[in-house]
Amino acid sequence: MTGTTSAVARALERIERLDPALHAFIEVWPDEALAREREAVARRLPLGGVPFAVKGPSGIRSHAARRLIAAGGIPVGATSVPGPGTHWQTWGQGAHGRTVNPWRADRTPGGSSAGSAVAVAAGMVELATGSDGAGSVRIPAAWCGVFGLKTTNGLLPSPDRSGLASAGLLARSAAAAEPYLRQVLDGYEPPAAPPLPLPAVYSEDLGFADVDPEVAAVVGRAVDRLVAAGTVRLLDRDAGLLDPVGAWTAVRGGAPGDPEAVRVRRTNDERLDDLFAAAPLLLTPVTPNRPHGHEGPGTVYSTALTWAFNLSGHPAASLPAGFTGDGCPVGLQVVAARGADVSLLGAARAVENALPTVRP
């Protein structure tokens, strides 16, 4: 292997060439990465020198990063997260400027795993670590057109004392995410191809969200394609959740015992338990809106359809569903029962096989 042909060298070259415009990284570690790669290849470690990025300045110390490094993964740099004092956590601040969406530079990539999503979408790395406390993996995955997974709450160490945040990852596809989970999850067994069609419930708004009609139409067409392909079979059920905004805010603020928060969480948990007793999957849009401008989303909660599952603890993934007419990626959210992370990955692979990405 020569330095000009190795996977890490190629990743570093793309970072050097593309990141001055995208601002996905806050730090890059070329010398250390190339040295780690030589060692991983020499020792024939399982990942064999796969380059990956870590979320934010502390990402290299995360449980997932340590497991990936031990298996021969090569961290090439730390990706952008929101700058200090930002109220809306849907953009990132790279070393040389605000992180931009690789599809439209005038739009945000989402956050808070902003740089991780951009680095994967632009092909700078094979995968990147993330964390998701309200949608921080799924939203940037949706808005950058890549795969993103929030694991079951408590399955991996949480970076957040409230317990709302779960470890996650971003990759070009569900198939590309499999090596990550194989190394990070104890006792991992590759998912068997699920029997099709998979019973699923589709909810455009979870019973409360105000969804952009074009975003809803893109996801609706994707679900129709899944049905036509025999990948899913829709059940005539309604998710009908309560809006979790107040409950999430109370828990995040250190008041999980707030009576209204307890009521909302209990009601939503009961409704989700009933739903997953009937079907293994819940399908929704990832966000109610398309990527907004860098000035912020205004009064719209980009998290409206994601943070219910941080409260409930369910694993959830974002898969590319298509594009709006103005060239913005839209994500399909796929949610599974608590602890069914590996089964969710298998279902996500079946879904993406039936949803070939049509680039605008």
Image: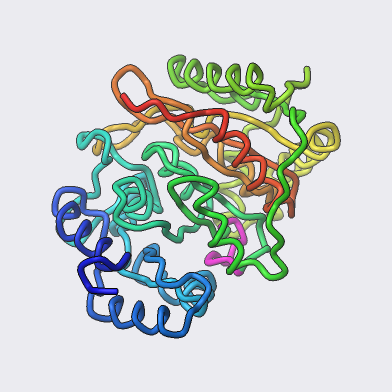
Q: Is residue 98 above or below residue 72?
A: above
Specify the principal SS of the magenta part: loop
Residue at x 23% of width, y 79% of height: 31
Q: Quadrant of residue 267?
A: top right
Is 339 situated left or right of 141 in this image? right
Whole-percent x, y for residue 258 in the image: 69, 50
Magenta segment includes 162: yes
| Rendered-image quadrant of the C terminus | top left
Is 185 situated left or right of 7 in this image? right
Q: Quadrant of residue 32?
A: bottom left
Magenta segment includes 337: no
Whole-percent x, y for residue 47 in the image: 49, 70
Is 280 situated left or right of 90 in this image? right
Whole-percent x, y for residue 150 in the image: 57, 51
One can see residue 258 in this view: no
One can see residue 216 in this view: yes
Residue at x 15% of width, y 55% of height: 17
| Rendered-image quadrant of the N terminus | bottom left
Residue at x 52% of width, y 28% of height: 355
Most extreme residue toward the front, as rendered?
A: 1
Q: Which residues are magenta?
A: 157-165
Whole-percent x, y for residue 270 in the image: 82, 39
Query: Residue 208 or 41: which is nearer the viewer?
Result: 41
Q: Quadrant of residue 94?
A: bottom left
Query: Residue 176 or 306: which is nearer the viewer?
Result: 176
Q: Is residue 1 above or below residue 149?
A: below
Query: Residue 15 or 92: which is nearer the viewer?
Result: 15
Residue at x 70% of width, y 30% of height: 241
